[in-house]
Image: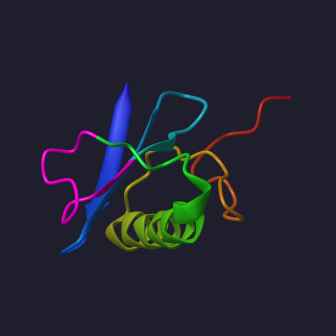
Amino acid sequence: MVWRGIRTKRMKYTVCGAGEGMAPWQLFDLNADPHELSNLVKDPAWRETVADLHAKLLGLMSDSGDTAPVAAAFGSAQQNVIPLE
């Protein structure tokens, strides 16, 4: 299992997966939930935040040359995943 994440002053977002590509896994509001007890990744109220952090994470991975596979999510295309034929 492989995972990557991004953290801002307020939020922590992670993706996790394997050969088929990492997918959204966790989102925590660190101000409201410093012990990371409430995963918000599937909460519709946080969809815009998740999509924004997902795009930022993909950008950071691309900029750093990270070739770990990421599945398509939130309007972002898959990254580094070889499509199955």
Question: In the picture provided, is 62 more to the left or to the right than 35?
Answer: right
Q: Which residue sits at x=61%, y=31%?
A: 20
Q: Main secondary structure of the magenta part?
A: loop
Quadrant the N terminus occupies? top left
Q: Which residue sits at x=62%, y=43%?
A: 81
Quadrant the C terminus occupies? top right
Would you place residue 25 above or below residue 30 in this image? above
Question: In the picture provided, is 31 more to the left or to the right than 61?
Answer: left
In percent of width and height, residue 76 lies at 66, 64
Corner quadrant of residue 60: bottom left
In percent of width and height, residue 53 lies at 44, 68
**Is 66 or 4 nearer to us in this picture?**
4
Question: In the picture provided, is 19 more to the left or to the right than 2?
Answer: right
Q: Which residue sits at x=24%, y=39%?
A: 37
In percent of width and height, residue 29 lies at 29, 61
Tell me if residue 63 is in the magenta stretch: no
Q: Which residues are magenta?
A: 27-37
Q: Which residue sits at x=18%, y=75%?
A: 9
